[in-house]
Image (cartoon, grey):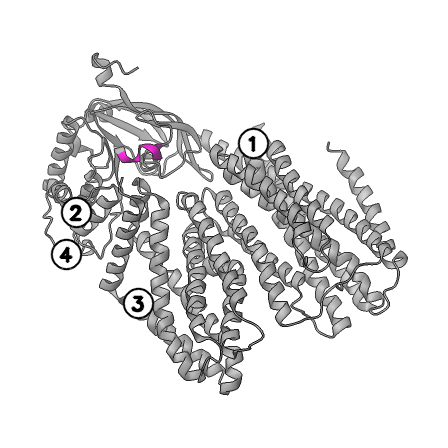
Amino acid sequence: MSAPSGITMATLTKDIRLEWRSKDAINSMLFFALLVVVVFSFSFDPVAEESRHIAGGLVWIAFLFAAVVALNQTWAREIRNQVLDAYRVSPAPANALFLAKAVGNFIFVALLEALMTPLFIMFYKLRALGPAWQLLPVAVLGTWAIVVNGTFFAAMSLRTRSREIMLPLLLFPITIPALLSMVEATTTILVGDPSTSAKFWMVLLATYDVVFTTGCLALFETVLHAE
Amino acid sequence: MTFLYAAYAATWAIHIAYLITLVRRYSRLKLAVDELNKRKR
Amino acid sequence: MNDPNTARAQADPIITVTNLIKQFGRFAALRGVTASFEAGRLYGVLGENGAGKTTLLRVLAGLVRPTRGTVAILGKGDPREACREFGYMAHPSLLYDEMSGMENVRYFARLYGIQNDARCAQSITAVGLDPELGRPVGQYSQGMRQRMSLARALLHDPKILLLDEPFSNVDIRSAREMVKLLAHMRDQGKTVFVVTHQASLLDGAADQFVWMQAGEIINRTPDRKYMETA
Amino acid sequence: MKKAFPILGLLTAALLSFALYEALVVAPREQTMGDVQRIFYYHVPSAWTAFLLFAINFLASVQYLVRPRPQADKIANWIVIALGALTSIGAYVVRPLPQNMYPSSVVTTGVAIVGLYFLIKKYFSEQETDILALTTAEVGVVFCTVVLVTGPLWARPVWGIWWTWDVRLTSTLVLWLIYVSYLMLRRFSTSGQTPVLAAALAVFGALDVPLVYFSIWFFRTQHPQPVIGGGGSIDPRMLHVLLINWLAFLCFAFLVCWSRYRLEQLQREVEETQALEALLEPRSTVR
């Protein structure tokens, strides 16, 4: 029985290799992210001063939107030839598959965000007044919060009729506290208001990640095998 | 004052609407039960 | 129960199924199947569409939970615990289309904790395919895909093989080769279940034919002719 | 037991009308807001009832998930007891408590949660915990809708705005969203094990509640908003009327849950008999 981490790595490298080989998913997603940024920028054309107050919300809503479309594809390849059955029949633990898929999604969504951020900065003439380095931990914790629950609910919505719409329906209510933390942390950093700091929001995001990562690892087995 | 009565009325409107759906669901179920009993005899 | 030196022990029931019922809503896929199967036998499971053949196989593989009834594989109550002991092959290929046969088999080998590629290449050649074939599985013919899927099922040298329509869309010559391979495995002591509509292929190879109809086993005969004439 | 239902129904109706009388006439008139403050006597009890129902849903869902796995069952018992102890101690240790939460009420909730958990454990079979979870979720959403309707109706005359990001009102809104998605998952699921999926989502939803509360609470401290129901202590006579109303709503909720529970039980019995019939039908296979 090879260590679960071995299986996670194998699944992750397999996914990345497939993604790299077919590239069609990544290209369409990158173009989609670009569209989302442009559409958002058209609908709001704020002056530099104002944009600092609303940019946090806009950026994260755009990321969430792009992430949901990416998360819907998580299990597409496993469903096509019922490969999931091959996995369920094998002695490999369910959590190894989940972690590989979650980390794979994290890399995928982070890639989208890396593309979208410079565009946002350009379109909204953004310049962080507060400690800009704090944006990185907020982005990492926030993206993981979306992706870990997203992967879990994508697996859960496999068992429902309208699969594409079920994922956001399940994901958004549960993600509200994380979304609020990301938006508020980003806005506090951008506005650079000395009286408040983004620390509380980062602590809350970290707790959110820990709580839901444990929850996902505890419950994924039952969801995977609920045929 | 009207907001007070509106709020109270709304509360009961919601509850009664839900109870109506329960009653309708129950009557539909009753049909199925009767049908089953008929077939069993 | 497992007294080693008597003949009876050699043919100990490897799988016992009691009063197995599976219902999808109102459709009764399995209506109470009770049977036990000995090790080292090749069983041909025959029957029309909707007779419950695939459901029975999926219940044995632990992919489907029975509504009622019990399944015991190698003395273990829950098939999932015996998952290392059986190989499963289904109508869909259970392979990644974008990866070549070898890459697929190597990935699934990792799930069973098998690191060396020699074992993977060996199971691919066993089904008569070339391990070096670089083409992705998506571009294989249906017959080649079925055989690669069989290679994936044989990979970890399981005691039990659960094969759902392994010969569909496979040309007669390669189907006969597959049957020879399965018979060889049976001789090595493996228990092989083959769900198929081409029963004639199993003549002379299968030890027993299990006839299913409307979710029940209606007959178990040593050869196919007996059922047709009855 | 069947004939107890109408008697209880009459009793509850009487209690409800008495509570209505108390709320409209007996309760003292609030100086600043005037009579519109009386919405308080419907708004807050509905919220408390909804939270209680969602708590029962959470406990029943945990039961449903852990009962088939004895090892997880033991762990769950200890977690619940620890949770109860934690909230009771926390009530006195944590200063300042979020606005107008009295230590005594926090302790009672903590103890009630533990009590409810072991009550459900004792009297409900695995299948019944699933029915209980579905019932409490559905009726909980109805009470939550009431809260979300009466909230703005109260905010409008007093502050001239329909919606205020008040901590409790917003938490109730998020809770409402979570449990509506729970009900939709149950309706859209095509899986044989829908209760398992629903129980997993219910656990996720409950894990989310404290995070929702604290994120909005801190959000509110940064953007001060008018607060529904005032912050300070409450006139004892008003509290008296509030508790009567809450008792009345609890009885009403109990009756609604009971009938919805029986309805669901009957529904499942019908489905089972139909499935059994299909089982015994003459052998017709798909040609």
- Of A142 and D68, which appears nearest the observer? A142
Query: Residue at left 38%, top 79%?
Result: A119
- Disc 1 to disc 2, how far (Cα)? 49 Å
Callouts 4 and 3 in the same chain: no
Q: Nearer the viewer, mark 4 or mark 3?
A: 3
Q: Chain of mark 1?
A: B
Residue D260 seen anywhere in this rendered image of the structure: no
Q: Where is mark 2, residue-wise?
A: C143
Q: Where is mark 4, residue-wise?
A: C135
Q: Work out whether D193 lies above or below A154.
A: above
Residue B39 tag number: 1
Disc 3 marks a residue whose amino acid type is: Ile
Identify the secondary structure beneath mark 2.
helix
Which quarter of the picture shows residue A4? top left
Disc 1 marks a residue whose amino acid type is: Arg
Marks 3 and 2: in contact by CB < 8 Å?
no
User: In this picture, which residue range is highlighted in magenta?
Assistant: C79-84
Q: Chain of mark 2?
A: C
Q: Chain of mark 3?
A: A
Q: Residue C175 location in percent, x, y?
A: 14, 39
Identify the secondary structure beneath mark 3.
helix
Categorize mark 4 by other alpha carbons within 10 Å: few (<14), some (14-19), many (20+): some
Callouts 1 and 2 in the same chain: no
- Disc 1 to disc 4, how far (Cα)? 60 Å
State the quadrant of the N terminus of chain C.
top left
Q: Where is mark 3, residue-wise?
A: A26
Disc 2 marks a residue whose amino acid type is: Gly
Q: Nearer the viewer, mark 2 or mark 3?
A: 3
- Disc 4 to disc 2, how far (Cα)? 15 Å
Q: Residue D285 location in percent, x, y?
A: 37, 35
Q: Nearer the viewer, mark 1 or mark 2?
A: 2
